[in-house]
Amino acid sequence: MSTPRERAVRAALKAQYRGLYNDGLSILFAHDPIGLNSGDNEDEYAPEVQTNLPRLRQARSADDIHRMMHEDCIGWFGGMAAPESRWDAPAREQ
């Protein structure tokens, strides 16, 4: 369950990045690098998308996106973060 502040941040990012926000959610949900997909929780990767999107402007390649996504995963999950190799496919799709 998200807080009103989290919902406001999510709404602002959706407005700023439009389709990229939903695309990011869909890509992470489909590839499920952390194993959060239980079939009906499509917004489970919202925090990761919220930290990924603002950084995408700095990316110059899929490798940059891969690194950024993994760094964000470590930030959110610490020692429970998915191995770096699990971010290959979603990074290449973004």
Image (cartoon, helix red, strand yellow):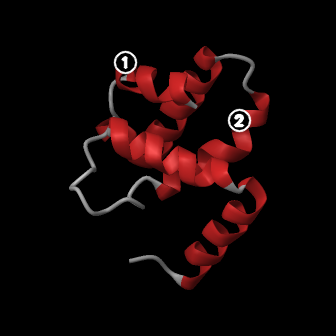
Closest to the observer, 63 or 25: 25
Q: Residue at x 69, y 61 (%)?
A: 13
Mark 2 closeness class: few <14, some 14–19, many ≥20 residues within 10 Å = some
Percent coordinates x, y for residue 59 in the rendering: 72, 25
Percent coordinates x, y for residue 21 in the rendering: 61, 53
Report the side of 33 relative to 87 (left or right). left
Q: Picture quarter containing residue 31?
A: top left
Q: Picture quarter containing residue 12?
A: bottom right
Q: Secondary structure at mark 2?
A: helix
**Does residue 68 sit above or below 49 in this rendering?**
above
Q: Amino acid at mark 2?
A: Leu
Q: Picture quarter containing residue 27?
A: top left
Q: Residue at x 59, y 30 (%)?
A: 68
Q: Residue furthest front?
A: 19
Report the side of 75 relative to 57 (left or right). left
Closest to the observer, 30 or 12: 30
Q: Which residue is mark 1?
A: 85
Q: CA distance from mark 1 to mark 2?
A: 19 Å
Q: Amino acid at mark 1?
A: Ser
Q: Residue furthest left?
A: 38
Closest to the observer, 58 or 27: 27
Q: Earlier in the sequence, mark 1 or mark 2?
A: 2
Mark 1 closeness class: few <14, some 14–19, many ≥20 residues within 10 Å = few
**Does residue 30 sit above or below 68 in this rendering?**
below
Q: Which mark is residue 56?
A: 2
Residue 68 visible in the picture: yes
